[in-house]
């Protein structure tokens, strides 16, 4: 699979190499709505079964993060190399029967590396990427600031997007990028369920993402 991806990327790079080249570094910010139904069912079970909560675990919905990368454009096509990191924290608070305050905190982090291809006129491109994404879920240890990893899994993901050029000049340019990120495999979150609800059946979630990125280029597009 990895050989096929590398071969496809090299072939795309060669095809794109016809024409006047424009290379850009890319930095961006993204926000995405995560499809996390099974994960949120774990939260809902915890909220229902835990007495004296003063703050329930809210569903995992939106994640926010940073994108960094490189774009190499020739004519109506471009190849891209991107890194993305998104995260969100979820916290529950309550009081024990002995009037002791307690806190349960989970930290969700999704980080990915991807190569991609996009095509279209200057200010409107359609793109697709293939890459590797790691989903990591950590829980806070007691009252300390340290976290321990509950679940961690890597899967192939693809992102399908539209790149809409908003404005720019000779020094920098801006684009908006609505996208859908599709996970080809699931992430095992059984340990999250075990930590919250005390049982450990096999539970998977794919964490597909519908999102929007604001992308800045160090030059015109």
Image (cartoon, rainbow, N blue to C red):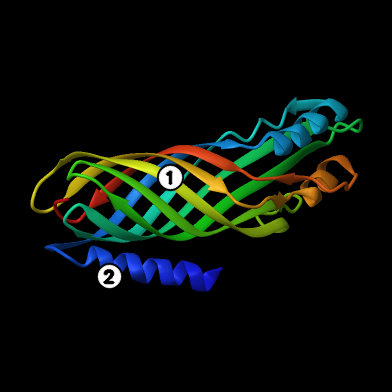
Circle 2 SS class: helix
In this rendering, the count of numbered labels is 2
Residue 51 shows up from this direction: no
In percent of width and height, residue 174 lies at 22, 44
Q: Which of the image's four quarters has the N terminus? A: bottom right
Q: Position of residue 61 (x, y in %)?
A: 58, 33
Foreground residue, 157 or 10?
A: 10
At which x and y percent is residue 119? 27, 50
Please give the label number shown on residue 135: none
Residue drawn at x 41%, y 66% is 8
**40 left or right, relative to 126:** right
Work out whether residue 7 or residue 150 is closer to the camera in this orientation and state it: 7
List the residue tagged with mark 1.
160
Q: Which residue is mark 2?
A: 14
Q: Residue at x 68, y 53 (%)?
A: 138
2 or 1: tag closer to the N-terminus: 2
Q: Residue at position x 57%, y 37% from top?
A: 34
Nearest the camera: 159 or 67?
159
Residue 11 found in image quarter: bottom left
Q: Secondary structure at mark 1?
A: strand
């Amino acid at each position: 699979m990895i050989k096929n991806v590398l071969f496809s990327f090299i072939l795309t790079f060669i095809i794109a190499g016809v024409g006047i080249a424009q290379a850009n570094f890319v930095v961006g910010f993204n926000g995405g709505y995560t499809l996390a139904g099974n994960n949120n069912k774990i939260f809902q079970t915890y909220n229902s079964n835990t007495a004296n909560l003063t703050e329930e675990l809210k569903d995992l919905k939106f994640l926010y993060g940073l994108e960094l990368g490189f774009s190499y454009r020739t004519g109506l096509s471009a190849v891209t190399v991107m890194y993305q990191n998104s995260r969100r924290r979820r916290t529950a608070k309550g009081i024990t029967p002995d009037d002791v305050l307690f806190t349960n905190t989970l930290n969700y982090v999704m980080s990915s590396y991807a190569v991609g291809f996009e095509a279209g006129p200057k200010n409107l491109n359609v793109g697709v990427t293939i890459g590797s994404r790691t989903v990591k879920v950590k829980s806070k240890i007691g009252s300390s600031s340290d976290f321990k990893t509950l679940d961690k899994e890597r899967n192939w993901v693809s992102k399908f997007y539209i790149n809409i050029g908003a404005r720019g000049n000779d020094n920098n340019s801006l684009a908006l990028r609505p996208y859908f990120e599709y996970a080809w495999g699931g992430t095992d979150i059984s340990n999250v369920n075990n930590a919250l609800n005390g049982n450990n059946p096999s539970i998977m979630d794919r964490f597909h993402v519908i999102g929007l990125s604001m992308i800045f280029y160090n030059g015109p597009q």
